[in-house]
Amino acid sequence: MSTSTLDVSALEPSVAAVTKAGMQQHASPRILAIANQKGGVGKTTTAVNLATALAAIKKRVLLIDLDPQGNASTGLGLSPQDRKKGSYDTIIGKMHIADVIVHSSIPCLDVVPASIGLSAAELELVDMPRRELRLREALQYQNLPYDLIMIDCPPALGLLTLNAMAAADGVLVPLQCEFYAMEGLSFLVKTVERVRKIFNAALSVQGIVLTMYDVRNNLCRMVASDVRDHFGAIVYDTVIPRNVRISEAPSYGKPVILYDTKCAGSKAYISLAREVLRREKKLQVQSRNI
Ligand code: ADP
Ligand code: MG
């Protein structure tokens, strides 16, 4: 595991702004599923970097790696030893979630790694009772000491993603600005609606974040504008730019915020963290008024 620790002071004025936007302590953690059935749209990158930006301001964050590819676990520098047990063992009911949590090298950020076996989970779950609710029940079973739990989903709307959505309060959708983006997005939104009706009445789309945005690319600009026209305020103001430092960081087992604190990608994820917290705060106020 990497031994580098997060230099929070290097993040200053942005961190101060995030803290100001801040989220109040929850009795139980808020749960966000990072989902999009398309691969390569920035789910894992968003999960890892958003989790890091939140941990940098002392929010206690648990990142659950629910993708058999285990990219979030790799991107956070977890060793094969760290990954011997993890989300698979929890979801099939072999181990309690508290027993599969490992600390990352970042203070305040813990991880449930994607353990060997997760790739078989989709098939194994088919015959299990309450197959869509296994992660939700695992998370409810124990009072976990976090402010936020984030779930990095695989690129499919199969049973693993359904488990994440059934367990979550909100879905955060990374969207790459390309031609087929909207098509996939309406299907994803319909899936969220179905999950809300059948398994989880509290579920909503927390937001859509445009990723790998290239301002010089006409199609990219057009798709971004279409998405904003169609989905309105649900799209975060923050846009994650296409940034080479973001793509380099995982090969060093580090989030970009540690790899190059001042690059455009890091700044964008810090800004996204600020928006996510603001929305969480608003949702909390709304739920108190119900
Ligand atoms: P997903 O989890 O949706 O499959 P990833 O987060 O793994 O997508 O991203 C896919 C690839 O794109 C990775 O190689 C990642 O490093 C790269 N990538 C993600 N976001 C950006 C970005 N903003 N700029 C440049 N490369 C990016
Ligand atoms: Mg991924």
Image (cartoon, helix red, strand yellow):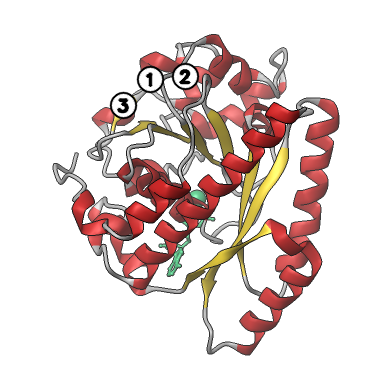
Image-based side of 178 in relation to 266, left or right? right
Q: Nearer the viewer, residue 267 or 248?
A: 267
Amino acid bearing label 3: Val
Label ID, residue 89: 2
Q: Secondary structure at mark 3?
A: strand
Q: Nearer the viewer, residue 212 or 179?
A: 212
Q: Is residue 42 left or right of residue 265?
A: right
Question: Which of the 4 image quadrants contains residue 129?
Answer: top right
- Tell me the kind of residue under disc 1: Val
Marks 1 & 2, CB-CB < 8 Å contact = yes
Residue 28, percent across and down? 53, 21
- Residue 113 visible somewhere in the drawing: no
User: Marks 3 and 2, Cα distance to the nearest angstrom?
Assistant: 14 Å
Is label 2 within 8 A of ligand 2 (CB to nearest ligand atom)?
no
Residue holding disc 3? 102
Q: Which residue is mark 1?
A: 100
Density class for disc 3 (Cα within 10 Å; few <14, some 14-19, many ≥20) is some
- Are the residues at dot 3 and dot 2 in contact (C-beta closer than 8 Å)? no
Amino acid beneath label 2: Asp
Q: Nearer the viewer, mark 3 or mark 2?
A: 3
For mark 2, does the 10 Å Cα neighbourhood hold few (<14), some (14 to 19), or many (20 or more) residues?
Answer: many
Q: Residue at x 34, y 53 (%)?
A: 16
Check disc 1: other Cα within 10 Å, few if <14, some if 14-19, many if 20+.
Answer: many
Q: Position of residue 279 (x, y in %)?
A: 60, 47
Tell which circle, 3 or 2, labels the residue nearer the N-terminal end. Answer: 2
